[in-house]
Image: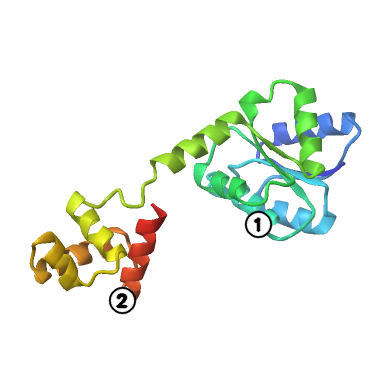
Amino acid sequence: MRIVIAEDSALLRTGLSLLLTENGHEVVEAVGDAEQLLRAVATHQPDVAVVDVRMPPTFTDEGLRAALLIRSSQRPTGVLVLSQWVEERYAADLISGALNGVGYLLKDRVADVSDFLDALERVAAGGAVFDPDVVAQILARNRRRDPLGPLTPREREVLQLMAEGRSNAGIATALTITERAVEKYVGSILGKLDLPPAGSDHRRVLAVLRYLES
């Protein structure tokens, strides 16, 4: 395999390069930040890129965001994220796409060299490899994210009636409240759901879509 390595630690970068070379693979370039990674992939078109999550300049999620760019570019390069951390937001994006030529492994769990090489070969061949802890954290994140969480029980009732196609007058009649009260509830719902202040009708439709998605 032809491989690009992106790892900010010079020691780990050198160690991975030696390991892969000793096992018959060609490390075409080893870089220390996400910008260099994207350039290296564009230049060499490797079979797979091994990418750390946290790299310069902020050491937060640059590597993972670069991995998503590689995936979205339609390049034939597989991406294996090898990290100390599970960055849930972008890891979820990585998993939600087409699961071909992609992997996410935790460094602490890669204890066996043969297992790592096997995972790398599977990703390069178009397969998918994910650490169980990565999948578990992403599933837990999705379960606890309720788009209607900020709403009060009364606001949920109003939103449900909106989803049934009722006007403010119809909602007021159903709940035995004034139309003015309904307007206040609707305004609060739109604000809590963080919907952009475009046309009011458009915002109501978006609110109903959020309700249906939940």
Image spot of residue 182 (x, y percent): 15, 66
Above or below 84: residue 40? below
Q: Look at 18% across and 66% down and name the residue there.
A: 171
User: Which quadrant is home to the N terminus?
Assistant: top right
Pointers 2 and 1 in contact (C-beta within 8 Å): no
- Judging depth in this view, the residue of 160 and 92 nearest the camera is 160
Q: Which residue is mark 1?
A: 69
- Tell me where residue 98 appears, x and y as whole percent: 67, 51
What numbered label is drawn on residue 201? 2
Q: Is residue 45 left or right of residue 50?
A: right
Q: Nearer the viewer, residue 78 or 154?
A: 154
Q: Earlier in the sequence, mark 2 or mark 1?
A: 1
Dividing the picture into quadrants, the one containing residue 73 is bottom right
User: Quick check: 149 left or right of 26?
Assistant: left
Tell me, for residue 140, which label it has, or none. none
Q: How many marks?
A: 2
